[in-house]
C-alpha cells in the first residue's frame, strides 16, 4: 500500500514540476522561445499518471 502511495506522490510531483517548467518557458519573451525552439509541438493539457 505504501509503495503505491509513494508512486502516486512521485507522479504528482513530476506532473507539478512539468507544469511549472512549462509555465516558466511560456513566460519567456517570444525571441528567446524561438531561439530555444519552444514549443516544438503542442502537448495535450492532460496529466498522465501511472494509475
Image: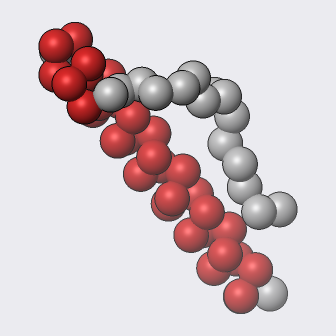
In the image: residue 40, left or right of residue 34: right
Numbered label tally = 0
8 w.r.t. 20: above or below = below
Residue 2 appears in the figure: yes
Q: Residue furthest top?
A: 30
Determine the image quadrant of residue 47: top right
1 w.r.t. 31: above or below = below
Q: Residue at x 77, y 63 (%)?
A: 50
For the C terminus, give its image quadrant. bottom right
Residue 4 percent location from the top left of the image: 75, 80
Q: Residue at x 32, y 28 (%)?
A: 37
Residue in front for this viewpoint, 41 or 16 = 41
Residue 14 percent location from the top left of the image: 51, 59
Residue 8 percent location from the top left of the image: 68, 68
Residue 27 appears in the figure: no
Q: Residue furthest bottom?
A: 2
Determine the image quadrant of residue 2: bottom right
Amino acid at each position: 500500500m505504501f509503495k503505491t502511495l509513494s508512486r502516486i506522490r512521485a507522479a504528482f510531483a513530476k506532473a507539478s514540476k512539468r507544469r511549472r517548467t512549462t509555465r516558466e518557458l511560456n513566460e519567456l519573451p517570444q525571441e528567446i522561445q524561438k531561439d530555444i525552439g519552444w514549443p516544438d509541438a503542442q502537448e495535450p493539457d492532460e496529466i498522465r499518471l501511472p494509475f
